[in-house]
Amino acid sequence: MVLIVPDPVPTGLTTSIDSLERQLADMRAELEGMYARIKTGEFGELKNAMKATSEIRQWLKIAIEAEAQLATRKKTEKGIVHDYALDLDAARTAVGCRLARLRRARGSV
């Protein structure tokens, strides 16, 4: 059977999604850096540090949810249900070719 593979040429929507994924990755890296600075005590006041930590967690949650939705969308577009997809047209063609070879082989005996 033949597995479905992504299109080699990106579309306008694909380019936009790729850009969004890069932005989300950058945002996550920046937020993780801010969180590390908070843990080392760069924010003087505990109240401000707690508020910043809470906001960072909220933004990270939003970024992770957006990444999950993008991954689900990509899978859906490719027809992937449980981590794989089958190209049934290509499989049907391959089976037809094999049957034709068997018929020819049987006829030549």
Image (spheres, helix red, strand yellow):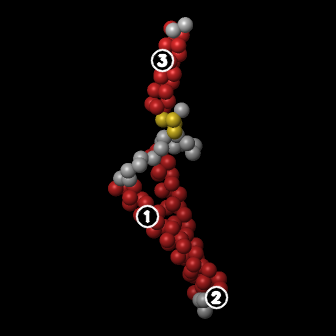
The total of numbered circles placed on residues is: 3
Residue at image x 46%, y 66%? Answer: 22
Amino acid type at image mark 1: Leu
Task: Find the residue positioned furthest to the left.
Answer: 12
Whether residue 73 is situated above or below residue 20 in the rendered picture? above
Q: Quadrant of the N terminus?
A: top right
Whether residue 96 is situated above or below residue 83 in the rendered picture? above
Q: Is residue 56 visible?
A: no
Residue at image x 60%, y 92%? Answer: 44
Disc 2 + disc 3, Cβ < 8 Å: no
Q: Secondary structure at mark 3?
A: helix
Mark closer to the observer (2, 3): 3
Mark closer to the observer (3, 1): 3
Reading the image, the residue beneath label 1 is 20
Q: Is residue 47 left or right of residue 27?
A: right
Front residue of 76 and 62: 76
Reading the image, the residue beneath label 3 is 100
**In which quarter of the view is residue 32 placed?**
bottom right
Q: Position of residue 7 (x, y in %)?
A: 41, 47
